[in-house]
Amino acid sequence: MNAPTSITSRDNPLLKRLRLLAHDTTAYRKQGQVWLEGDHLCRALLARKQRPDMAVFTDAYWLQAPHDLRDAADKIVTIPHALMAGISALESAAGVGFVWNLPAGAGLLPGEPAVVLDRLQDAGNVGSILRSAAAFGFKQVLALKGTAALWSPKVVRAGMGAHFALHLVEGLAVDDLSALAVPLVCTSSHQGDWLHQARLPSPCAWVLGHEGQGVSAELAALASQSVRIAQPGGEESLNVAAAAAICLHASAVAGEGAAR
């Protein structure tokens, strides 16, 4: 383990860069790095056998930090709690954060199950969908242009570590999805097969649309199937993240049954 470097000036260039990563929605695209704050996100990265480029600790937390966090990176920085609070986007600043180099950009994976995000705007919804995708075995998430930035600070926090289990591709156009070579299944609040009765293809790509407008007409026209969820309670529609969890679970169960 290398000795930590102590930083005490809030004007230090590194701290300015970390503040940008912690607050700016698309800073990761220019810097090629993300800021992961807090024990949970840091450990989620380590659990996926990934290594951060840098670990940043508050002075107090460094003295008591577990060995797996202390030994996680070759570059170690310690700063006063007040400076961590100046970086943090959390209500209460954490004692540790990692800087992680994003994987090199890659295209979609043909033939693999996928979740397609069509112009979803809410960071919380996007992060929750990433969690469901990882939980139910959908290894790639494809974001069309107009979707909230997948590695933005709010989406990363809402994803709770799911990002590190997924192959993520951003900025796609509808035409790019033809390379998937699996059926597209669109979610809908008012038309299509009832999910509990539907015969779902496996593998497939689930298409989740804009919170207000739903899936675009252009994309819906390419789908082999449209699916809706029965709502005996009578609500007009479900939150898109809740609908995604229900659909992806049903699809995973159907896929397991077909494989037996």
Image (tube, rainbow, N blue to C red):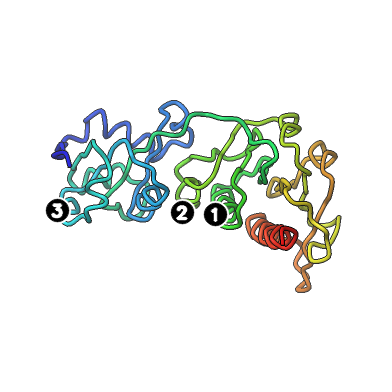
Mark 2–mark 3 distance (CA, rounded to whole Å): 26 Å
Residue 63: numbered disc: 3
Dots 3, 1 in contact, CB < 8 A: no
Residue depicted at x 19% and y 53%: 61
Q: Nearer the viewer, residue 231 or 137?
A: 137
Amino acid type assigned to the residue bearing label 1 in the image: Arg
* Quadrant including the N terminus: top left
Give the residue number, with chain letter if any, for mark 2: 160
Question: Left or right: where does residue 194 sit relative to residue 130?
Answer: right
Residue depicted at x 83% and y 65%: 197
Q: Nearer the viewer, residue 173 or 248?
A: 248
Amino acid type assigned to the residue bearing label 2 in the image: Met
Seen in the picture, residue 38 relative to 83 is either above or below; the reply is: below
Amino acid type assigned to the residue bearing label 3 in the image: Leu
Residue 131: numbered disc: 1
Question: Left or right: where does residue 4 sit relative to residue 203?
Answer: left
Indicate the secondary structure of the residue bearing disc 2. Answer: loop
Residue depicted at x 56% and y 57%: 135
Of mark 3 and mark 1, the one earlier in the sequence is 3
Crowd tier of the residue under label 3, counting other residues whose Cα lies within 10 Å: few below 14, some 14–19, many 20 or above: few
Mark 1–mark 2 distance (CA, rounded to whole Å): 7 Å
Question: Left or right: where does residue 14 sit relative to residue 63?
Answer: right
Crowd tier of the residue under label 1, counting other residues whose Cα lies within 10 Å: few below 14, some 14–19, many 20 or above: many
In the rendered image, the residue lying farthest to the front is 260
Of mark 2 and mark 3, the one earlier in the sequence is 3
Dots 1, 2 in contact, CB < 8 A: yes
In the rendered image, the residue lying farthest to the top is 30
* Quadrant including the C terminus: bottom right
Crowd tier of the residue under label 2, counting other residues whose Cα lies within 10 Å: few below 14, some 14–19, many 20 or above: some
Q: Position of residue 256 (x, y in %)?
A: 69, 60
